[in-house]
Amino acid sequence: MNVTERLAQFVACTPPEAIPPEARLQARRAVLDTLGVALAGCREEAPRIVAAMAREQGGAPEALVLGHSLRAPAAEAALANGVAAHALDFDDVSASMRGHPSAPLLPGLLALGERLGASGRELTEAFVLGFEVECKLGRAIGEAHYALGWHATSTFGSIGAAAACARLLRLDAGRTRNALGIAASLASGLRQNFGTMTKPLHAGRAAQNGVVAAQLAARGFTADALALEGESGFLRAAAGGAETGGEAVVRHLGAPWEIIEPGIGVKLYPCCYATHRAIDAALEARGGSDPALAIDAIAVSVTPGTLIPLLPRPPATGLEAKFSLEYCVVAALLDGRVGRDAFADAAVQRPPVRDVMSRVQIVEVGERMNFPIEGIAEVRVTTPAGEISARVETPRGDPKRPLSWDELAAKFRDCAAEVLPAGRVEKVIALIERLDGLPDVRELTAVLAT
């Protein structure tokens, strides 16, 4: 089965009316959430370094770099904004993709859409199609791919971003196939770099790869027709040489739409999603307890597979702490919240936190499930007064416990407040709420400019 051709046909030829209203609604929700976390993240050191490099390089002022008085070529803006979107690890997740779907998609689409003067409706349909490609790749090879050390946000994200950008450029099926093939060779990203600035670089690079692949294909640049399913193609190489059954990628395109079923997990905490059930359990167990209450021991039980993306060593920095289950549970218990300030280096290095972390024991128990969409976390805290505990199966923000639009807007306000004045924050929310009716996405980016 010609997987690359089938995907290209799907991306290029799906009529706009075939994309259901619910899929467009979920895309708008993802745009709001991703823009918010990108605005919050753009002042972090990693995206500031990338933005400074873009400023030094110069080039055509095609697209906005969030949080800066800078316009850059679309591919460079996509890189900078993609790094910002993933810098806090506060962006959404997909169980099918086994990664973060929106951070690679939106920065490239927004930059290219600004360059083209694309409509909001065109942007949302391209977003839905790119999301579908990312997640169907994840369904086909995601488990083997992730186990080998690849970061799906970067790899599947590059190909999904290329699909989305090809759609925005209105490429025909042949040129879309070339864009997918180009992106398949550009796709990379290693889990070994989790806990460093290079992890958010993965999302930025995927967004940039999508823009570059689609623009090259638009100019006639070629790639192999079997770039995905060929003997030496992406599917086989990315799954460690295993027979992957490329048919799984294209068998159910749009049936269901991945953005609807299983849907998107929205984060309430700016850290690895694998920690979120345990954080919810710790906060529930803590309740109204005195944060100064002595803690003798903490036992955390999680579903097998939960620890795969996490760091086994005690964290020394805020970036590392985002991948430390011990730290996240202790921060929740001691502080009663896990906000962005919990991942400052100084917060991680607090002596009381380090002391309690030494008394945390974590075990994986039970049957392996379809993590991260399914799983269990139980936190049991032993104190001089007795034991408190809680068990969580579905974290808040999960597709089974979705946030309302008002709750998403509240998260956006909190994230955007450090970059935009309050009036503009509200205008951005209103523009995204009616994004499908926006004649030109530059109306949105004009409000985002600082």
Image (cartoon, rainbow, N blue to C red):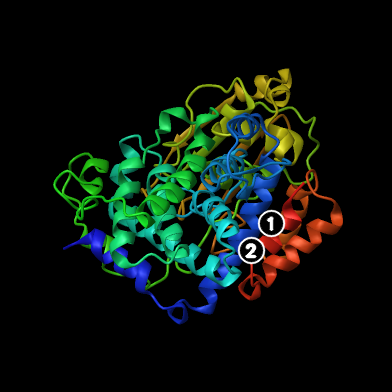
Hey, what amino acid is under mark 2?
Val
Q: In this view, does 266 lie above or below 40?
A: below
Looking at the rendered structure, which numbered label has been put on residue 302?
none
Q: Residue at x 24, y 63 (%)?
A: 5
- Give the left or right position of residue 302, taking residue 68 as reference: left
Q: Residue at x 35, y 41 (%)?
A: 186
Looking at the rendered structure, which numbered label has been put on residue 441?
2
Q: What element carries label 1?
A: helix
The Cα–Cα distance between marks 1 and 2, rounded to whole angstroms, is 7 Å
Pointer 1: residues within 10 angstroms few (<14), some, or many (20+)? some
- Give the left or right position of residue 138, taking residue 269 as reference: left
Q: Which of 449 and 333 is in front in this view?
A: 449
Hey, what amino acid is under mark 1?
Thr
On the image, the x and y values in percent for residue 340 come to: 71, 38
Q: Which of 371 and 436 is in front in this view?
A: 436
Mark 1 and mark 2 in contact? Answer it, CB < 8 Å.
yes
Q: Is residue 253 above or below residue 184?
A: below
Q: Which residue lies furthest to the bottom in this view?
A: 17
Q: In which quarter of the image is the N terminus?
A: bottom left
On the image, the x and y values in percent for residue 32 come to: 65, 59
- Give the left or right position of residue 162, taking residue 32 as reference: left
On the image, the x and y values in percent for residue 356 come to: 66, 24
Q: Nearer the viewer, residue 85 or 315?
A: 85
Q: Residue at x 21, y 51 (%)?
A: 224
Q: Is mark 2 on a helix, strand or loop?
A: loop
Q: Is residue 147 above or below residue 384?
A: below
- Give the left or right position of residue 399, taking residue 177 as reference: right
Number of marks: 2
Q: In which quarter of the image is residue 31?
A: bottom right
For disc 1, the marked residue is: 445
Q: Is residue 1 above or below residue 206?
A: below
On the image, the x and y values in percent for residue 95 come to: 44, 54
